[in-house]
Image (cartoon, rainbow, N blue to C red):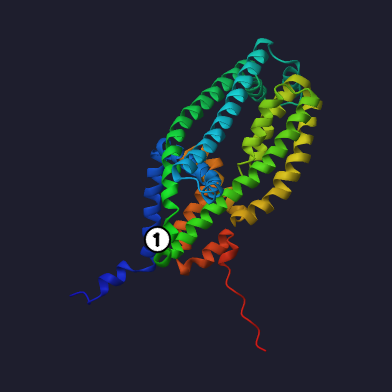
Amino acid sequence: MTAKPGAEPERLHSPALRVLLPLAAATVTLIGVHLAQDVLTPLALALVIVIICEPVRRPLERRGWPLWAASTIVIVVAYLILVVMGVLLWIAGAQFVALMEDVSGAGMPAAVEDLIAWLQSAGLDKGVSDAASALLDPAMLLSVAGAVWSSVLGVATALFFVCAYVIMMAVDAARYRQAPRLFGATEGGAMGRISRLSSGIRRYYVVNAAFGAVVAIIDGLALWWMGVPAPVVWAVLAFVTNFIPNIGFVIGLVPPAVLAFIVGGWPLMLGVVAVYCVVNVTLQVLIQPKFVSDAVGLSLTLTFFSVVFWTFIIGPLGAILSIPLTLFARMVLFEGDPGARWVRWLSGDRDAAPEAPSADV
């Protein structure tokens, strides 16, 4: 029996294949990104930094500065951001290691011994109390400090690659600024999508930096007033974790709360938790998401999922770069497709909503 003409094209364009082929392509792409994360992550970080610093160029060009001079200023501003990031990480890492060395040299804190005794008196299995003892043992904390310090050094090493990328991207950005003038007539849609992506990334980091600075200052002063060791470390941690949507508050709370319990027992720990809940929940959970949603047009569910997803794909920096990477993926996959407006609307993009029909008069 001979196949009917056109049967093969119909199978190739079946609904199942239209779904499976893009999923297969996306899976292969993400596997490649995961394997190349050591190369791609510094590149993505450098690109985000250049996008943030690029508006510095505009007033300089309006004053008649040559392109090379304006690009140099963009590079200097980007390097200042990297230097500040590196110094903060170095100070926080060094103080954290010194603090853990002091704790480990003092032996098992009384608060930890009381907690273990309470667990045993509550009738819990001895294995549970032993596990709690091992987790809060000063030697374990010291090993954690070593791992944290190694991570800090790894990030500092990655910043060297970021510095090299920044120079090249800042120079290329001067040339790419001519793209709307040269290709706006034929590629206006693509130019507009790239412009909206850059603006969204800048707004996102400006909003997070502003809220993060306020949270870090309040948390640091409160920890210093309560006598929690190394308040600068936890203030830096609060600032950095503010760039991690939704779960950053918990990540920033756990270390100072555990340390407060070790040095001051339950009262100090509950005081730290109370301060963080009042300050961080009010600013980061109740107020900030509204500003972030307005800035980037992403739903709360998608922002939470993007943190987990990009951290799995490219490592810890994926949590900080999750929103820009999600915006980039949405731009590439959906914003150029008129039939995907409903997908963009589901993701939180208010501009994708169809206009309401006008009422007949």
Q: Quadrant of the C terminus?
A: bottom right
Vertical position of residue 238 compared to residue 110: above or below: below
Q: Give x and y (percent) for residue 208.
A: 64, 44
Residue nearest the observer in this picture, 113 or 93: 93
Q: Residue at x 51, y 44 (%)?
A: 48
Q: Residue at x 77, y 29 (%)?
A: 221
Give the residue at the far front of this rendering: 64
Give the residue at the far bottom of this rendering: 361
Q: Residue at x 43, y 33 (%)?
A: 161
Disc 1 residue crowd, few under 14, some 14–19, many 20+, Cα 10 Å: few
Q: Give x and y (percent) for residue 158.
A: 46, 31
Q: Does residue 42 show up? A: yes
Q: Quadrant of the N terminus?
A: bottom left
Number of dots carrying numbers: 1
Q: Give x and y (percent) for residue 174.
A: 44, 48
Q: Which residue is mark 1?
A: 182
Vertical position of residue 86 compared to residue 66: above or below: above
Q: Quadrant of residue 213?
A: top right
Q: Does residue 246 show up? A: no
Vertical position of residue 359 compared to residue 250: above or below: below
1 on left or right of 182: left
Residue nearest the observer in this picture, 201 or 55: 55
Residue nearest the observer in this picture, 163 or 212: 163
Indicate the secondary structure of the residue bearing disc 1: helix
Residue nearest the observer in this picture, 47 or 226: 47
What's under tag 1, amino acid-wise? Leu
Q: Residue at x 44, y 57 (%)?
A: 332
274 on left or right of 28: right
Q: Give x and y (percent) for residue 82.
A: 54, 33
